[in-house]
Amino acid sequence: WIEGERVRTIAPLSVPPARPETASNIGWLRRYHPLKRIQSGRTGVCTARRASPGLVSFDPEPLEGARLPRTHLHPLRVALIVTVIVTALSYGAPLDYAATVVGGAFLAAVGWLVARHDIPTIRHFGVSLGGVVEPGPIDAKRVARDASKALAWALGLAVAIFVPFVIGFRIYWHVQQGFHFRPPASMFDEVLGQIVVIALPEEAFYRGYLMTALDDAWGTPWTVAKAKLGWGWIASSALFAAGHLLTEPNAQRLAVFFPALLFGWLRARTRGVGAPVLFHALCNIMAGTLTRGYGLTT
């Protein structure tokens, strides 16, 4: 699997394939044999079969149960530790800087758990962001291409859910008055803050690291609208909701479980966190606009 695409390599039967870019290197594909099933211990397995006389075809498949990068802690324990730290920081930091401190803590966790590792690991966890997070020079064309795709997914999904979103908002908050558009004090600060301070850190941790690590541990037996999902999708969304409840003790905060399911589906469908980040930010901006417009906040 390279950048989420399935590839096939053809190698002469007598010559082993080039060493894959894995963290473990597994002793040259665990005693390479051209007609054996070879498990890499990272992102996939190569099923070798004879393609034609003298050739062997290596057809990569997803590896169920892989947990990358290798740590001594289960992803749920990692999530518990990070949640405790983030909750403590949210109460200890000055109110005006609490969101920034919490976002920084999430990004630091993702940096330690994922971004400090090799390129295949970064891509596996979906936090490459067009190569910006990967070591090495940045390809501006790749960044622009991936960003445009992520934006198209986010805008398309936002348009699809806009009407039900507004209806659900009015029902949930028992809105009676009419809507009057009230812009934020600074639209630039609003958009930048929602993307960089809120959406990016949360999506990088919950959908990038946590959901992927749980999927590696538990598998993805379900297919939902062409996205491969499993219990990691549910568990990461539940922990996302629990984290919101802990930082702001209000049962209504648990409602974020449902948009988290959409964020998780989008991460699986697009194989990255770029689209979920933008969609998450759009949802927050829409909610803020409706809150101000219906006079639910001063």
Image: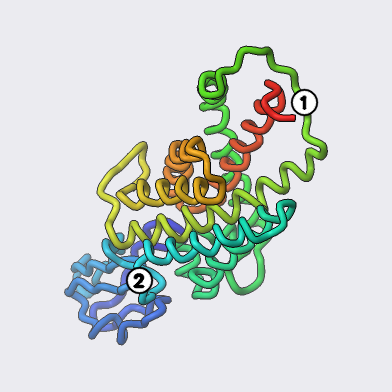
At label 1, counting other C-alpha atoms closer than 10 Å, the crowd grade (few under 14, some 14-19, many 20 or more) is some
Q: Is residue 275 left or right of residue 226?
A: right
The residue under label 2 is 42
Identify which residue is drawn at 58% across, 48% down.
277
Disc 1 versus disc 2: distance between alpha carbons?
A: 50 Å
Residue 156 placed where, x, y %? Answer: 55, 32
Q: Is residue 179 left or right of residue 133?
A: right
Residue 135 placed where, x, y %? Answer: 60, 73
Q: Secondary structure at mark 1?
A: loop
Q: Secondary structure at mark 2?
A: loop
Rendered position, 132 above or below 276: below
Q: Is residue 134 visible?
A: yes
Q: Identity of the amino acid at label 1? A: Arg
Identify which residue is drawn at 74% across, 18% down.
180
Towards the viewer: 61 or 171:
171
Which of the 4 image quarters holds residue 162?
Answer: top right
Image mark for residue 182? 1
Residue 3 placed where, x, y %? Answer: 47, 60
Which of the 4 image quarters holds residue 170?
Answer: top right
Q: Is residue 142 visible?
A: no
Towards the viewer: 190 or 98:
98
Residue 250 placed where, x, y %? Answer: 52, 40
Q: Is residue 139 left or right of residue 57?
A: right
Q: Identity of the amino acid at label 2? A: Arg
Number of the front mark, 1 or 2: 1
Which of the 4 image quarters holds residue 67?
Answer: bottom left
Q: Earlier in the sequence, mark 1 or mark 2?
A: 2
Q: Are marks 1 and 2 in contact (CB under 8 Å)?
A: no
At label 2, counting other C-alpha atoms closer than 10 Å, the crowd grade (few under 14, some 14-19, many 20 or more) is many
Identify which residue is drawn at 68% across, 21% down.
294
